Image: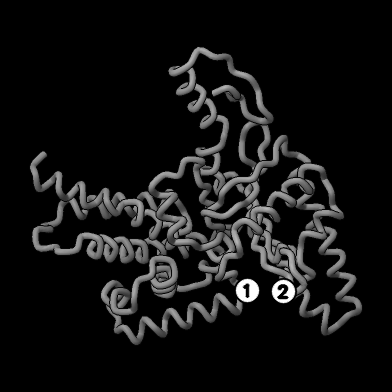
């Protein structure tokens, strides 16, 4: 390998985590994001880059444009999927990788990721670059080949659309949010339906995969037409509470995990992740916290990377590494076979 090739490889590796985080925010799929970053690496490797003064700007631009092109194609494919499309939840490792740290630096909750699906590719790119990666409008203009004023309008329009849809654009206090998630985990584990309802606001949004059990529109109708819509809302509330409880009832373990830098819940059965639950919380007017939105992901295809991190195969690999470094015995702790002494 020549000195130039070493330099190019080192420049790319220095920003690879950022590029992967950007592509994931754009596409909602870790696999697609990895493909985009691989394409960018090949183009960077083959390009004449001696005159490139700022590799990070060159690579960010190429990643964004490649992701926009891929998103345009994916949106047509996803629109035809009968089960509906959901972003893959990105679960963080206990010892965060560079990609996890880059993702946390560009904080954006899973609830926002869901709503980003409503934006056009250019709108999504401008919003992600400005809100998550703190690019100014001049930088975004160069990437999207628009004027700074046009990019300002695109971001403003995208932000308004997300806010109207109820996007939780600001994250709550991390410690208070984590306490609420732990209470949710305990209620799920003990099948405490009454306790479960008490954790939620009066009008939460509840989504399981692509099915909306309760939305703000439903509650708006109940206020305008108390009868019989209020009875329908009570019925829907009973339905989603039973849905959540049934997910946990068939799980052998309920664990708190980190979902994109924020506490969430994973349900496991026989060592495999069968559901990931992300919640949005906010402070109540009289103090304390409440859950205002819950998104549960149960489709196996959307949990592939969650299982790559937490599933049985991941645990087996971890045990193999442990055995190479210790002779101590392996015991079972809850749902995972682990060496508790190690």
Secondary structure beneath label 1: loop
Quarter holding the N terminus?
A: top left
Depth check, front residue: 318 or 150: 318
Q: Residue furthest top?
A: 327
Secondary structure beneath label 2: helix
Name the residue at 48% across, 82% down: 157
Image mark count: 2
Query: Label 2 belongs to which residue?
Result: 216
Depth check, front residue: 81 or 109: 109
- Res 205 → quadrant: bottom right
In the picture, the disc for residue 166 is 1
State if disc 1 and disc 2 touch (CB < 8 Å). Answer: yes
Q: Is residue 239 above or below residue 122?
A: above
- Res 59 → quadrant: bottom left
Few, some or many residues within 10 Å of mark 1 (<14, 14–19, 20+): some
- Name the N-terminal-most of marks 2 and 1: 1
- Residue 133: x and y, percent? 39, 66
Name the residue at 35% across, 56% down: 18
Q: Is residue 128 at least partly visible in the picture?
A: yes
- Residue 256: x and y, percent? 64, 45
Distance from disc 2 to disc 1, alpha carbons, whole Å, reads: 8 Å
Few, some or many residues within 10 Å of mark 2 (<14, 14–19, 20+): some
- Residue 218: x and y, percent? 76, 74
- Residue 295: x and y, percent? 65, 58
Residue 44 left/right relative to 332? left
Name the residue at 39% across, 73% down: 126
Quarter holding the C terminus?
A: top right
Residue 234 left/right relative to 276? right
In the picture, the disc for residue 129 is none
Depth check, front residue: 113 or 265: 265
Q: Is residue 41 above or below residue 26?
A: above
């Amino acid at each position: 390998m020549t000195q130039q090739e070493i330099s190019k490889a080192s420049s790319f590796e220095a920003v690879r985590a950022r590029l992967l985080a950007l592509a994931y925010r754009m596409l909602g799929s870790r696999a697609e994001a990895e493909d985009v970053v691989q394409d960018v690496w090949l183009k960077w490797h083959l390009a004449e880059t001696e005159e490139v003064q700022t590799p990070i700007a060159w690579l960010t631009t190429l990643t964004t444009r490649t992701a926009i092109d891929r998103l345009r194609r994916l949106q047509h494919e996803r629109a035809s999927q009968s089960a509906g499309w959901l972003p893959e939840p990105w679960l963080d490792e206990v010892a965060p990788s560079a990609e996890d740290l880059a993702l946390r630096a560009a904080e954006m909750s899973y609830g926002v990721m869901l709503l980003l699906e409503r934006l056009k590719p250019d709108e999504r790119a401008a919003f992600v670059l400005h809100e998550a990666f703190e690019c100014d409008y001049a930088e975004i203009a160069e990437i999207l080949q628009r004027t700074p004023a046009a990019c300002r309008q695109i971001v403003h329009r995208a932000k308004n659309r997300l806010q109207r849809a109820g996007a939780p654009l600001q994250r709550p206090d991390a410690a208070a949010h984590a306490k609420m998630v732990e209470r949710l985990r305990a209620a799920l584990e003990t099948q405490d339906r009454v306790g479960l309802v008490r954790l939620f606001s009066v009008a939460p949004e509840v989504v399981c995969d692509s099915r909306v059990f309760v939305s703000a529109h439903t509650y708006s109708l109940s206020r305008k037409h108390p009868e019989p819509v209020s009875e329908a809302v009570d019925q829907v509330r009973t339905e989603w509470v039973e849905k959540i409880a049934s997910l946990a009832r068939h799980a052998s373990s309920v664990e708190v995990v980190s979902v994109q830098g924020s506490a969430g819940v994973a349900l496991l059965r026989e060592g495999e992740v069968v559901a990931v639950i992300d919640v949005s919380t906010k402070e109540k007017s009289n103090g304390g916290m409440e859950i205002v939105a819950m998104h549960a992901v149960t489709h196996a295809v959307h949990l592939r990377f969650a299982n790559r991190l937490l599933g049985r195969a991941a645990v087996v690999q971890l045990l193999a590494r442990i055995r190479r470094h210790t002779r101590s015995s392996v015991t079972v702790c809850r749902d995972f076979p682990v060496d508790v002494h190690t």
